[in-house]
Image: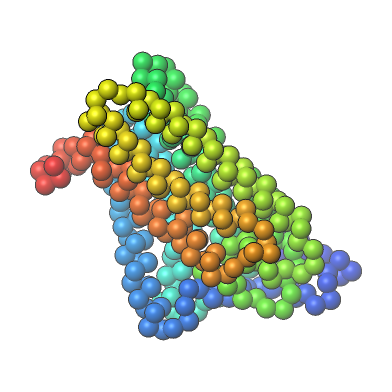
């Protein structure tokens, strides 16, 4: 409520004459066609169920099976919980809009959605970098792995990843204390900052600079750390004498690298490009990558292709069909 209260207390001489105090926005979504909306609703509902079920299963198995009480699965468990929270910020509202046809979202609801999208997205960026570092230590420094990745270090890295998301509070406050002119229609399926800035009155250069700086912190910096980790991993893989060992290790790493490239690549294009090149339709489809596609791929890439994970499924449910 502080955001709305501060807007209402703003002095009139600081508000452009053509600005309006908005109490809700309209999310235009991906399509206006009723038939297409029903198809999209079915698709995204199935995807959301898969994300919830897959990540809940990962959390359950990594807690119940002692063999999975390792740093790798500790990070994976946190990633799964984060993915559930991240998708639950945006997808349920998108499903509601597709099903009911009512595309409105309150001003406070839009602010909350924007904040938690950046908070959880930033936390995920640093957690993915942490997981890449964990794989680097495991593959490149196996003799020192347990010393370098002990419980205290792992807990500290996860806490640092989660707390990094709080940096988004300042940016959200900057955006939602702006004055908005005329239209309240956001050409997007979520409350995202680039389309919101298009509705703002006056000079938004400081806010755009803040978006750029935060994108550097949340996207570019973790992605560079990931690339450095994988560069070391690939160098170590090339030094493995066994072709079978090289193939096995590279297969796992390449899958992880594809996922993080989709996540960081789409986020980089969305938040680091100049505002003059803003394209609503392009941004919407890029946003689908890091809000929907990557979360549904993560359980498959990080767990279901893993022998330890399938072994845990066998032990707990007694099934042999996962072999």
Q: Residue at x 51, y 29 (%)?
A: 156
Q: Give the quadrant of residue 96.
A: bottom left
- How many labels sit on residues? 0
From the viewer's perspective, tell me whether residue 262 is left or right of residue 119. Answer: left
| Residue situated in front as seen by the camera: 225 or 128 | 225
Give coordinates of residue 175: x percent, y percent: 69, 60
| Residue situated in front as seen by the camera: 178 or 216 | 216
- The quadrant the N terminus occupies is bottom right
From the viewer's perspective, tell me whether residue 58 is left or right of residue 205. Answer: left
| Residue situated in front as seen by the camera: 33 or 273 | 273
Q: Residue at x 42, y 50 (%)?
A: 83
287 above or below 247?
Answer: below
Q: Residue furthest right?
A: 13
Q: Residue at x 37, y 78 (%)?
A: 38
192 above or below 33?
Answer: above
Give coordinates of residue 257: x percent, y percent: 41, 42
- The quadrant the C terminus occupies is top left
Q: Give the quadrant of residue 68.
A: top left
| Residue situated in front as seen by the camera: 223 or 323 | 223
123 above or below 10?
Answer: above
The image's colour scheme reads rainbow
- Residue 231 in view (yes/no): yes
From the viewer's perspective, tell me whether residue 44 is left or right of residue 118. Answer: left
Give coordinates of residue 73: x percent, y percent: 34, 35
Give coordinates of residue 267: x percent, y percent: 54, 53
Q: Residue at x 54, y 38 (%)?
A: 224
Q: Give the quadrant of residue 4.
A: bottom right
- Residue 159 in view (yes/no): no
94 above or below 50?
Answer: below
């Amino acid at each position: 409520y502080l955001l709305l209260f501060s807007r209402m207390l703003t002095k009139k001489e600081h508000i452009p004459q053509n600005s309006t105090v908005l109490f809700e926005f309209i999310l235009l979504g991906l399509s206006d066609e009723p038939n297409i909306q029903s198809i999209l609703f079915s698709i995204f509902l199935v995807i959301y169920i898969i994300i919830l079920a897959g990540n809940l299963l990962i959390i359950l198995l990594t807690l119940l099976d002692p063999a999975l009480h390792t740093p790798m699965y500790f990070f994976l468990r946190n990633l799964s919980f984060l993915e559930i929270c991240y998708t639950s910020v945006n997808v349920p509202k998108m499903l509601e809009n597709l099903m009911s046809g009512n595309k409105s979202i309150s001003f406070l609801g839009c602010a909350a959605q924007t904040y938690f999208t950046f908070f959880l997205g930033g936390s995920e960026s640093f957690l993915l970098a942490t997981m890449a570092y964990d794989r680097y230590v495991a593959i490149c420094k196996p003799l020192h792995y347990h010393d370098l990745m002990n419980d205290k270090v792992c807990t500290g890295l996860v806490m640092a990843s989660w707390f990094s998301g709080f940096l988004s509070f300042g940016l959200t406050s900057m955006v939602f204390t702006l004055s908005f002119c005329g239209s309240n229609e956001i050409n997007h399926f979520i409350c995202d900052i680039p389309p919101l800035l298009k509705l703002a009155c006056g000079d938004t250069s400081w806010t755009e600079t803040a978006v750029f700086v935060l994108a550097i912190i949340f996207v570019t910096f973790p992605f560079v750390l990931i690339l450095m980790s994988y560069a070391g991993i690939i160098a170590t893989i090339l030094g493995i004498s066994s072709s079978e060992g090289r193939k096995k290790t590279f297969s796992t790493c390449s899958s992880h690298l594809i996922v993080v490239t989709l996540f960081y690549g789409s986020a980089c294009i969305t938040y680091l490009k100049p505002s003059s090149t803003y394209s609503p339709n392009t941004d919407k489809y890029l946003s689908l990558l890091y809000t929907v596609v990557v979360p549904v791929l993560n359980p498959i890439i990080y767990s279901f292709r893993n022998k330890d994970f399938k072994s845990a499924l066998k032990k707990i449910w007694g099934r042999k069909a996962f072999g």
